[in-house]
Image: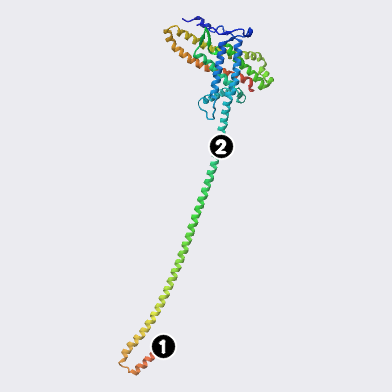
Amino acid sequence: MDHGSPMIEDVFGISWLDFNLSNVLMTFVASVIVFLIAVIASRNLQRKPTGFQNFMEWVVDFVKGMISSTMDWKTGKQFLPLAITLLMYIFIANVLGIMFMVEYNGDLWWKSPTADPGVTLTLAVMVVALTHYFGVKLKGGKGYVKDFFSPIPILFPLKIVEEFANTLTLGMRLYGNIFAGEVLLALLVSLMASGALEAAAGFLPMLLWQGFKLFISGIQAFIFVMLAMVYMSHKVSHDH
Amino acid sequence: MLDPRLFILNAEIGFNAGDMIVQLVMFVILLALITKFAWRPLMNVMQEREQHVANEIDTAEKNRQESERLMKEAQDELKGTRTNAQKIIDDARQTAKSEEAEMIKAAKSEAERIKESARLEIEQEKERAVQALQEQVGTLSVQIASKVIEKELTVDEQEKLINEYLEKVGESK
């Protein structure tokens, strides 16, 4: 059970431009699933909601609650679409790896896209970049820079470190949780595949671990969005 | 049993710039599309509903106040009507009482009048009877006297006496 990755290296002859096609595929699949869920749920919208619309409104309200717990709803309103999309995308991406893994020609094609550090760090960098963007936009350049020197100027180096630490932990936390889950799943699968006795022994742990991984998927999506909103509120809110 | 190489699962996955670019672009596209096609309409509907509910609550409150006002009005009206009715009844009772008294008075005076006239009639009758009795007594006494006297009086003397009497009666009349 040796997993390779479907790599394409040096695209267009650019030496650093490598693609892991598995990641590309799974990113695409996750995006399509999230898009379909959202569009199907918000099709045929009614003032008196039923079924799927109810669920989607519950999600929206849930994210609304997350945002209002970190910042003023007036400024937080504009981050609502971003937060919901992040939450759903990460959750779906996490869950994708639970159901099954697909290998083809020894390459691992189907897995969680979030089990790749590059993907999670991209999301983290994007979120942190957005916090800086909105920080400048909502507080002005002066207010934005002043934040690095408050409450006391001596904290400035720490603040700079904090930015990188935030980005790294945000991405790596997600990656670590999901990747660890997939490793354990792969171990259990290989155990069950090695014999009848092992299959019987591994059945219950497999079931339990899949359930637990589903739980972790939700929790990690929640934590990611929550932290993203906390970082955002640090940058955009005026009260410290 | 377990392949030790599992522990280096995905080991060759590093940071592929291509993946990162794809991920970023994909997410931005997803965010844009989903916001346009799902979140905006959904949020609009939610906001609209919020507005609707707020309006309904306002309307309900207004209606409640209106109905309360109307009820109070009706109660006042009812109270007024009740007082009015009571007054009318009282008036009627008063009128009836005074009418009754008047009627009784009229009846009493009528009775008095009738009694008076009856008394007068009785008086007259009595007088008449007395008169008749007087006459009767006169004749009777004459007859008795004549019967007593007959034996001692002559016809001439008798005639003379009668005439005397008659004259006396005529005078007294």
Precedes in sequence: disc 1 or disc 2: 2
Q: How many numbered markers are drawn?
A: 2
Placement of B60 over or under B107, stated as above or below: above
Residue A178 in the figure: left or right of residue A155: left
Are there few (<14), some (14-19), or many (20+) residues within 10 Å of tag 1? few
On residue B59, the disc is 2
Q: Under tag 2, what secondary structure? A: helix
Residue nearest the viewer, comparing B35 with A115:
B35
Residue B44 in the figure: left or right of residue A136: left
Where residue A181 appears, x then y in whole percent?
A: 51, 12
Where residue A107 appears, x then y in whole percent?
A: 53, 8
Q: Under tag 1, what secondary structure? A: helix
Q: Which residue is mark 1?
A: B170
Which residue corresponds to the image point at 47% horizontal and 9% vertical from the top-left? A189
Placement of A239 over or under B97, stated as above or below: above
The chain that hosts pointer 1 is B
* Residue type (three-letter) at the residue carrying disc 2: Thr
Are there few (<14), some (14-19), or many (20+) residues within 10 Å of tag 2? few
Q: CA distance from mark 1 to mark 2?
A: 117 Å
On residue A57, the disc is none
Which residue corresponds to the image point at 66% horizontal and 21% vertical from the top-left? A137
Residue extending farthest to the left is B151
Residue extending farthest to the right is A142
Residue nearest the viewer, comparing B3 with B128:
B3
Residue B109 in the figure: left or right of residue A25: left
Task: Kindly indicate whether the residues beneath marks 1 and 2 are on one polypeptide chain.
Answer: yes
Please say which color scheme the image uses: rainbow
* Residue type (three-letter) at the residue carrying disc 1: Gly
Is residue A166 visible in the rendered image? The answer is no
Q: Quadrant of residue A145?
A: top right
Where residue A52 appears, x then y in whole percent?
A: 51, 24
